[in-house]
Image (cartoon, rainbow, N blue to C red):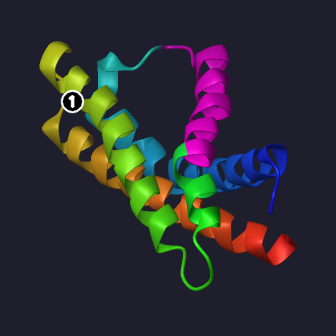
Amino acid sequence: MAGPLLTYGVTLLLFLVIDGTWLGAIAGGLYRGQLGTLLAERFNLAAAGVFYLLYPVGLSVFAVSPGLAETGGFPLRALLLGALLGLTAYGTYDLTNLAVVRGWPLSITLIDLAWGTALSAVVAALAVVILRALS
């Protein structure tokens, strides 16, 4: 069984690589085009860093670890719990923005909800597969 630091490390690495690819190759221009003047002029690296360090903790605790407790086969529990966590977390952010930020686009809310759900599900399931292979 993988320890909590290895579980976190694998989850963090997967999250950074997959989300970084999404933001760098696909979504960066989409967000800039849709959010325009709502975006800050300067990227807040500290806030982003805290998110990228914190969110994989939640994935590790609430999706990956329960997925590791499931024996054999496809990591369905991790996939489903990751999806639920992603929908909840990204939904909290996007639906709050839709409710209170003037000009927040519905399209960004829907895209981000889908992405957060899929990203969290895939990262949790892949982390379980990798951690099982390492054990």
Q: Is residue 84 above or below residue 55?
A: below
- The one of 122 and 68 positioned closer to us in this rendering: 68
Q: Which residue is mark 1?
A: 95
**Residue 49 magenta-highlighted:** yes
Give the class, few, some or many, for how many residues have Cα within 10 Å of label 1's Cα (few <14, many ≥20): some
Task: Give x and y (percent) for residue 118.
Answer: 40, 60
Going 54% across and 74% down the picture, which residue do you hit? 75
Per the rendered image, the range of residues in magenta is: 41-61
Mark count: 1
Q: Main secondary structure of the magenta part?
A: helix
* 133 magenta-colored: no
Look at the picture and state if 39 lies above or below 83: above
Q: Which quadrant holds residue 1?
A: bottom right
Give how far across and how far down residue 66 sits, in percent. Answer: 56, 57
Left or right of residue 95, residue 115 in this image: right
Q: Residue at x 46, y 54 (%)?
A: 82
Specify whether 105 is left or right of 1. left
| Residue pictured at 40% horizontal, 46% vertical | 86
Q: Quadrant of the C terminus?
A: bottom right
- Judge left or right: residue 86 versus residue 128: left
Q: Quadrant of residue 92?
A: top left
* Residue drawn where x is 62% and y is 41% of the image: 56
Q: State the residue lying farthest toward the bottom.
A: 73
Query: Label 1 sits on what residue type?
Result: Leu
